[in-house]
Amino acid sequence: MSRVLSSRSNMGRWLRSTALAAAALVSATAMSATAHAEDTIKVGILHSLSGTMAISETTLKDVMLMLIDQQNKKGGLLGKKLEAVVVDPASNWPLFAEKARELITVDHVAAVFGCWTSVSRKSVLPVFEETNNILFYPVQYEGEESSKNVFYTGAAPNQQAIPAVDYLMNEDKVKRWVLAGTDYVYPRTTNKILEAYLKSKGVAAEDIMINYTPFGHSDWQSIVADIKKFGSAGKKTAVVSTINGDANVPFYKELGNQGIKATDIPVVAFSVGEEELAGIDTKPLVGHLAAWNYFESVKSPINTKFINDWHEFNKKPNRTTNDPMEAAYIGFNMWVKAVEKAGTVDQTKVIDAMVGVAVPNLTGGISTMMPNHHITKPVLIGEVKGDGQFNVVWSTPGTVVANEWSPYLEGSKDLIADWRHPLFCGNFNVVTGKCGGASK
Amino acid sequence: MGCFVTAFLAMTDGVVPPDPEGDVMVSIHRFLAVLLVSLPLLATSPARADDAPDPFIGLASQNFDIVANAVSALAVSGNPQAGATIAAIEADNLYVDAADDGAPKILIKQGDAYIDARTGQKAADINEDDVNSVRVNNAVRRAIEAAKGGMDLFAADATTRTKAAEKVFTSHDAAALPLLARAIAAEKDAKAKLVMEQAQAASLLTGDGGSDAERIAAVAILRARGDVESKSLLQSLHDQSKPVATAIDAATSSLARIEQLWSVLQSVFYGISLGSVLLLAAAGLAITFGVMGVINMAHGEMVMLGAYTTFMVQEVIRTHAPGLFAVSLFIAVPLAFLVSGVAGILIERCMIRFLYGRPLETLLATWGLSLILQQGVRSIFGSSNREVGTPEWMSGATQWGGLTITWNRLTIVIFAAIVIAALMAVMRGTSLGLRMRAVTQNRRMAAAMGIRTPWIDALTFGLGSGVAGMAGVALSQIDNVSPNLGQGYIIDSFMVVVFGGVGNLWGTVVSAMTLGIVNKFLEPFAGAVLGKIVVLIALILFIQRKPRGMFPLKGRAVEQ
């Protein structure tokens, strides 16, 4: 009897607490609903603020808040104020889809800026296509995608990986390649493209070593030793690193400790920027490379202003800027311009207005939204300096147009994306003349 | 300098143009080419450098090749300022003032002031806006290295000469032979001489010169050196005369056997080092989970607190007492023990003591706590990684036969051994340890003997957490110091404790080492991802067979 009683009282307590929580939730929603007057335009921010990706994505949330704040100080958009709706998908990929749906159907946002990893983007993609909303994706990625509802402001492989490999091949006369990456979709696809590209340039199969490691890999001893051995075969060797996130710090520390210098075996990284280097003593890494479309050290008036604004907004005089921040900056300005051009935030009209929109990028040039929903960008190669910044040693003379479908992969070499009417297709097969056909 | 260059050049006459493979070699060629060009100038008027074309001018170029050539030219120019200037480029302290239309000024930055690199005098009227640093990339850095390598073969210090000879060995360029011959003749230090002879052998074999007997002798020298570089160099030789080819074949196959042996030893060391990391991470858990039976999901966060304590210690040292940096870790270890230990006692007092005997609730509550701690640290320190420096004595590596042993890994192995020894001493030799064991084995009896069991519980949990904090100091040296640091180790820690046998410290040691070594032997064959999976599956099967791990506790205590 007593057991029943106690369980009932437990149940009572549970019910009470649930009811309380529910009430709190309802009142919170109600409050926010009343606070949001009708004359604002809501913008969704979908970046992880907790979990493993918080390290990278929190910065993008902050830069979006800064851009929205600046736009409001300039008088808002279409005479209305912009209002940021920030949600936290907590580095949990299915939660990205839920939170995206919440932003679109509950908050009725005009556009969403968000995602970092490819898997999170793939997870929200169906939501955006179903609800016909807009996502701005600000990170370099593996390509092989073009959606009507997504605008990719980060680099496609030909805007980052391939120029970097070309640089090493031409300037450093590299003959032997280690492709090292974290085991998930971006490194795997990028390395597949790079492998095909290197082979097309006459690199033999035995001169390519491919290595994958799990997320957060921390014991690099044997892999770095393998790289050293691979590099001692008498041909100039370089490492192309698609190692992501937290695994980079122990990787570079091990490189430094085992005495692999950039003058012997340079490492060119696609996911290591100023933010990632902030956690390492960079002196042993001087000369290792990174390929991006923006570096904080680029000297241009617009970049100086951006960095000053950023420091002022954060009240932190040494917070770094990085490439995905520039991509977010370009994406936001493009959206503002397209909305002004369309005269409405209606998604269908804005999507049509986006193609051809051109805004200044932070390196002193102009980036344009192309019909494939990717933008034109310059490609820069930087060498790590002792102070954790990059020294730009090479850059493309102008901007590069993205190849959303890689010409080096069997499955995509015949595909193109063109979101202008009448073609209006993300995977048009130029051989069969059909939309949606994979190439054979 | 001028005299040496002249002598050197006389010997490099008639050098066959070497093939332009490899960049170090390219730099050396560049170095030699510049030597040849500057010969007449130096030979006629070595003392009057101002007659020569200004070797500094190229440094101002935006083109890396021109800068690299300028470095090589400067190195052999005999200019008294050459050494200081090249050192300044290396230290990122060389600047160009392009204010005037004439020859740009080359400036060395010293503190806030600038010094004219050409004269060594203080430069006045420098407008900061016109000053840009000299452009440096890997090609320029290689030119610097080659220039210094050539100059250093005759340095006063034997270690510097040995290092320079190593550089020549790696670039093994036939053009360096006359230079090496001169250096060997002058060399008194046995070790430096040996490396120079090895460099000579390597350079000889790369070129076409030398009789068969000389070449076979060179193969023997490389065979005696016996490292990976020697083997790969021998393997890259083709089109040799018959006796030389035979000698090379014999040498490579013998070197391959030696290399295989070393690689086994190397894997064992990697395994021990990985095992020590696992052991450190799991040692605290072996107390809280192993001895007390608390499933503490916040264990990883205790490790993280230790790492952040290290960061704080280094921050304070950096701002207040930079001289203490070398010993920062020694200061951090006891502090990390205290911080995590106190945190552990608080957690036990405020939370876990209400949950004894309810493992599921403990698991959920501590997991929640781990999230709270992570987010708390994220709010205070920010989500990005914090830089924890490595003291000089822990950086780099040492070569022991064919083994490469990095200092930081070796330090961690030793540290893990000390921590475990201390832990065992506490558990076995102190009255606190006695009480801990008494309480965990038979709580009622211990209470009846007058032991304050709740207090002992708190101290035990504090001890386990404190050890986790010390592990954090070690992990800060090899991993990210970020709020997620602990998450990466929690699963591995539980794996180690369960595999070793819950409640048995020796079991934890053996299990950590086994897992480390097995992992490192699997990695080369299976890859890091598959290796981990294989280990996990093997572990599950093992636990199926022996649910209490490798070294189960026996006796009545187990029945509780």
Image (cartoon, rainbow, N blue to C red):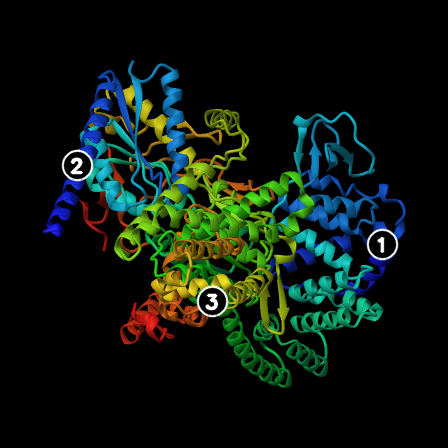
Q: Nearer the viewer, mark 3 or mark 1?
A: 3
For disc 3, the marked residue is: B275
For disc 1, the marked residue is: B1
Mark 3 → mark 1, Cα distance in angstroms: 53 Å
Seen at 72% across and 48% down, the residue is: B71
Seen at 63% across and 65% down, the residue is: B398
Q: Is residue B364 above or below residue B397?
A: above
* Quarter containing the C terminus of chain A: bottom left
Dot 1: within a 10 Å radius of its alpha carbon, few (fewer than 14), some, or many (20 or more) residues? some
Q: Is residue B376 above or below residue B229?
A: above
Q: What's the amino acid at mark 1?
A: Met
Mark 2 → mark 3, Cα distance in angstroms: 49 Å
Q: What's the amino acid at mark 2?
A: Arg
In the rendered view, does B222 fall on the left or right side of A105? right
Mark 2 vs mark 3: tell me if same chain. Answer: no
For disc 2, the marked residue is: A16
